[in-house]
Image (cartoon, rainbow, N blue to C red):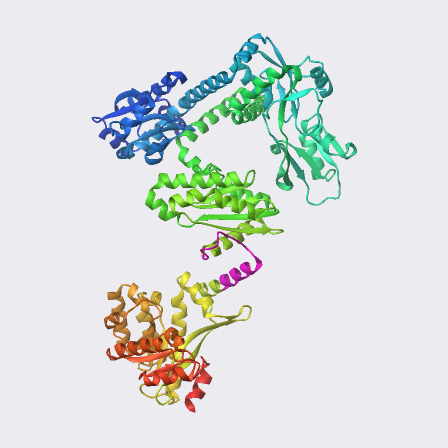
């Protein structure tokens, strides 16, 4: 208990101290370093919108709370902007989104807290940024928010009043009292006994109108909450304004305002039921909605939401209608948006001027969303107050005191540990889109949902972020997020990682939406040389987590195809991915029972006798069947396990050579080669591993040859050459494979201790079945150049007699190709030697 009190005391000191308390030694050193440095603060003069109070706040925070040596300069927007660009200002305080600093904000370091408000620091003050952020969190964020709200209210009031005609202004002065009728229900509007006022979106909207116009508006309802009585009073002109929904036909003498609210009607339904009954709460908006769309005999009415949920659980009904899905535990049911119901304000025709004034109020209002959120907050607060009232009459005063103290401690801890809490929020701080935590919650709750899972990735975002900086990177992410929200309105959107977004869309025309998204991202793509890849999957009965995994597979596949902007996860693609994952599993588990070597003979072009062979990797599996090297070699390289294949084939090759030697089937000069990839050759253990294979079989490397490719020149050549020399000491010869297939030149060959150069079949193919003079001359010239290096030349891919005759005339030493033999098994190779 004593420790808790000490902790509480320290937190209280931190919270209510008159000066900022550094959180660590680094912060203390930073503040001390600026003690004798004068910093020039630029503040914007804007008396029209009470900007003076905001200026006082920022000046107080920097001067008095942080103790910085501040000189204040107050000018208009343009002058402040000019002074900052001339580097005569160190800090610019409280810049708004609609000011002239938009371009400046995109290029300088910004501290953002209240929406739409920023503090700008020059780059050299980066070490102050975190301290200013902490100061805002500890003391000034709420103060700035309140002052900002007041400013926004003044701006709105000014814009609204300026939009009125002189006649409309005079008309407002004549209005003494305007009655507004509402129907009370548990979803949109109700009367709070605790606060003695009407609560809900409509009442708060009316309060806001009254506050900004000075007109006395009175919210009224029928004593018995009878909708017909309210509607009759409106038609009889006892009530001037009446909120009505746009989902049915009304009296032709009624005129309507612009929509002020658009709640979503949700259909909550069970998974397994043949019942066709619809459930609603009595005297609710949902009941009126149900009457318009369903037969009355199919509608069951319940006293409250608990009874409604119970009926859905017992399958007494199959569908429940709700505006507020938080009223029920929906995790056990399907939740679908049934319809958006627009709410208008209705007027009698003779009140057209009042209607027009309300329209201008709605049009100029920037805080309708705030009104909706405030209504929900007040509703929750009212419910909480009811609960507190109940507890006060049933619990001991000491219990309430303990609870109050705990709430205070929790509140203070939340402020102090704000950074940790922020990570747990379900919205991404940059794009304001639901984050990965929200996505995981979504897939765990929804399970199976019909529609399209879409995965989008910014291909080269890391390079762009590095090139332009993090601020621009955040701007790009924000732009991508806005584009997705614009095209996929009302869909489930998530930012699941740095540059990857997930979308679940019930939209049927998914390809049209993706094309629209491509057009929407075009400017961003051209400006920053961005590329986007998209994969999507049409879900029918898979769980959502699998759907997004399949969409991710399609995304990765689309990256490989530069001409493809988006790609569907088809069954064929999923099958290929499952096959690739099986190969990865084999490699990671070192399951090589299906991996085997085949051997293609090398023959003397002069006498056509076998002088060696090349060992090639093949793979066969009971379930996957034959796996081509074109499949498993790239996969092994991709996951950095190609050395496992190289070592396994090397092992089988060495064992086979030992068998040939013990059977006296090979003589001195015979060479059986196997391949070592550059990734394998770069490993520190490559020589040790090959030596251990020789030792295990009690054989030297005199009958063996290592084949490498010209990619060796992209490695650390000094280290690689040392390993090659060690292999040659074991008796191996060295061959350069696929020469002329890449970009190497003859001039690079002397850098390597080569014994053999194998010519790639590409040039030989051009000779083909006809005598191509140009190709023949090139091949002959290369042979002469390489011959000067005193190495043996092997021609690969010989298929025709014409090619064989040409190679004999060109004095090529050894041949390899289908004209002599395709790759064969070890037994077949033995039989060929014996002949």
Reply yes or no: does residue 562 show up in magenta.
yes
In the figure, is residue 66 to the left or right of 228?
A: left
Q: Residue at x 43, y 67 (%)?
A: 633
Does residue 48 sit above or below 456 in this rendering? Answer: above
Reply yes or no: does residue 563 show up in magenta.
yes
Q: Residue at x 32, y 77 (%)?
A: 777
Q: Give the quarter of the image for residue 258.
A: top right
Question: Residue 681's spot in the image, x, y percent?
Answer: 32, 68
In the figure, is residue 476 to the left or right of 41?
A: right
Question: Residue 299's spot in the image, x, y percent?
Answer: 75, 33
Q: Give the quarter of the image for residue 88.
A: top left
In the depicted view, which residue is nearer to us: 395 or 121? 121
User: Which span of residues is magenta-colored?
Assistant: 560-582
In the depicted view, which residue is nearer to us: 647 or 356? 356
Question: Residue 716's spot in the image, x, y percent?
Answer: 27, 63
Q: Residue at x 75, y 32 (%)?
A: 300
Q: Give the quarter of the image for residue 94.
A: top left
Outermost residue, left direction? 36
Does residue 417 sit above or below 646 in this rendering? Answer: above
Question: Residue 625's spot in the image, x, y percent?
Answer: 54, 70
- Report if residue 224 is visible in the image: no
In the depicted view, which residue is nearer to us: 545 or 3? 545
Count of labels shown? 0
Does residue 42 sit above or below 524 in this rendering? Answer: above
Q: Quadrant of the C terminus?
A: bottom left
Q: Residue at x 45, y 25 (%)?
A: 408
In the figure, is residue 713 to the left or right of 207?
A: left
């Amino acid at each position: 208990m004593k420790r808790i009190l000490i902790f509480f005391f320290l937190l209280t000191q931190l919270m209510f101290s008159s000066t900022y308390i550094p959180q660590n030694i680094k912060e203390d050193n930073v503040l001390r370093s600026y003690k004798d440095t004068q910093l020039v603060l630029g503040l914007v003069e804007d008396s029209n919108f009470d900007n003076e109070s905001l200026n006082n706040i920022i000046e107080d925070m920097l001067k008095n709370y942080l103790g910085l040596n501040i000189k204040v300069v107050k000018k208009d927007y343009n002058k402040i902007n000019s002074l900052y660009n001339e580097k005569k200002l160190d800090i610019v305080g409280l810049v708004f989104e609609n000011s002239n600093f938009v371009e400046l904000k995109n290029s300088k370091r910004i501290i953002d807290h209240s929406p739409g408000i920023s503090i700008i620091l020059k780059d050299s003050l980066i070490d102050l940024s975190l301290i200013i952020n902490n100061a805002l969190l500890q003391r000034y964020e709420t103060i700035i928010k309140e002052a900002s709200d007041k400013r926004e209210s003044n701006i709105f009031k000014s814009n609204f009043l300026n939009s009125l005609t002189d006649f409309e202004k005079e008309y407002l002065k004549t209005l003494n009292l305007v009655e507004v009728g509402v129907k009370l229900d548990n979803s949109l509007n109700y009367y709070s006994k605790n606060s003695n006022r009407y609560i809900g979106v409509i009442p708060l909207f009316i309060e806001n109108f009254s506050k900004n116009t000075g007109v006395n508006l009175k919210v009224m309802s029928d004593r018995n909450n009878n909708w017909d009585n309210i509607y009759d009073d409106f038609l009889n002109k006892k009530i001037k304004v009446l909120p009505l929904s746009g989902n049915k036909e009304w009296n032709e003498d009624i005129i309507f305002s612009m929509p002020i609210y658009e709640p979503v009607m949700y259909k909550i339904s069970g998974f397994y039921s043949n019942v066709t009954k619809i459930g609603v709460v009595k005297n609710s908006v949902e009941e009126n909605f149900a009457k318009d769309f369903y037969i009355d005999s199919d509608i069951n009415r319940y006293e409250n939401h608990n009874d409604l949920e119970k009926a859905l659980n017992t399958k007494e009904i199959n569908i429940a209608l709700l505006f507020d899905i938080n009223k029920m535990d929906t995790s056990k049911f399907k939740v679908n948006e049934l319809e958006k119901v627009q709410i208008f304000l209705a007027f009698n025709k003779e009140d057209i001027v009042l209607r027009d004034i309300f329209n201008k109020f709605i049009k100029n209002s920037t805080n309708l969303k705030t009104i909706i959120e405030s209504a929900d907050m007040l509703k929750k607060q009212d419910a909480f107050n009811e609960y507190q009232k109940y507890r006060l009459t049933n619990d001991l005063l000491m219990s309430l005191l303990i609870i109050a103290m705990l709430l205070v401690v929790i509140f203070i801890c939340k402020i102090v540990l704000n950074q940790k809490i922020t990570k747990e929020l379900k919205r991404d701080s940059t794009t304001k889109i639901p984050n990965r935590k929200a996505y995981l919650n979504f897939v765990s709750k929804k399970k199976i949902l019909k529609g399209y899972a879409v995965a989008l990735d910014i291909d080269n975002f890391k390079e762009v972020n590095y090139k332009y900086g993090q601020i621009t990177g955040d701007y790009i992410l924000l732009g991508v997020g806005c584009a997705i929200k614009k095209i996929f309105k009302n869909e489930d959107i998530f930012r699941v990682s740095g540059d990857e977004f997930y979308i679940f869309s019930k939209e049927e025309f998914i390809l049209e939406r993706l094309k629209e998204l491509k057009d929407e991202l075009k400017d961003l793509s051209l400006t920053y040389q961005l590329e986007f890849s998209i994969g999507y999957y049409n879900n029918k009965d898979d769980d959502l987590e699998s759907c997004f995994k399949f969409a991710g597979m399609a995304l990765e596949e689309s990256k490989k195809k530069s001409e493809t902007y988006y790609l569907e996860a088809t069954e064929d693609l999923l099958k290929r991915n499952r096959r690739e994952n099986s190969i990865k599993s084999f490699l990671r588990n070192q399951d090589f029972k299906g991996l085997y070597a085949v051997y293609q003979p090398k023959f003397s072009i002069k006498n056509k006798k076998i002088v060696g062979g090349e060992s090639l990797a093949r793979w066969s599996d009971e379930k996957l069947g034959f796996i081509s090297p074109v499949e498993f070699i790239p996969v092994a390289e991709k996951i950095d396990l190609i050395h496992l294949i190289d070592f396994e084939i090397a092992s089988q090759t060495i064992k086979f050579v030992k068998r040939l030697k013990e059977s006296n089937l090979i003589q001195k000069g015979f060479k059986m080669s196997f391949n070592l990839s550059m990734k394998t050759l770069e490993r520190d253990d490559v020589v040790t591993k090959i030596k251990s294979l020789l030792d295990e079989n009690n054989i030297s490397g005199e009958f063996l040859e290592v084949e490498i490719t010209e990619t060796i020149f992209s490695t650390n050549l000094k280290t690689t050459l040392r390993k090659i020399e060690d292999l040659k000491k074991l008796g191996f010869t060295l061959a350069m494979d696929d020469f002329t297939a890449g970009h190497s030149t003859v001039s690079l060959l002397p850098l390597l201790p080569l014994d053999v150069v194998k010519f790639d079949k590409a040039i030989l193919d051009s000779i083909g079945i006809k005598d191509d003079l140009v190709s023949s001359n090139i091949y002959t010239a290369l042979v002469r150049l390489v011959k000067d290096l005193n190495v043996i030349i092997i021609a690969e891919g010989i298929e025709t007699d014409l090619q064989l005759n040409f190679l004999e005339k060109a004095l090529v030493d050894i041949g390899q190709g289908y004209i002599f033999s395709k790759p064969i098994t070890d037994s077949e190779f033995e039989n060929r030697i014996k002949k």
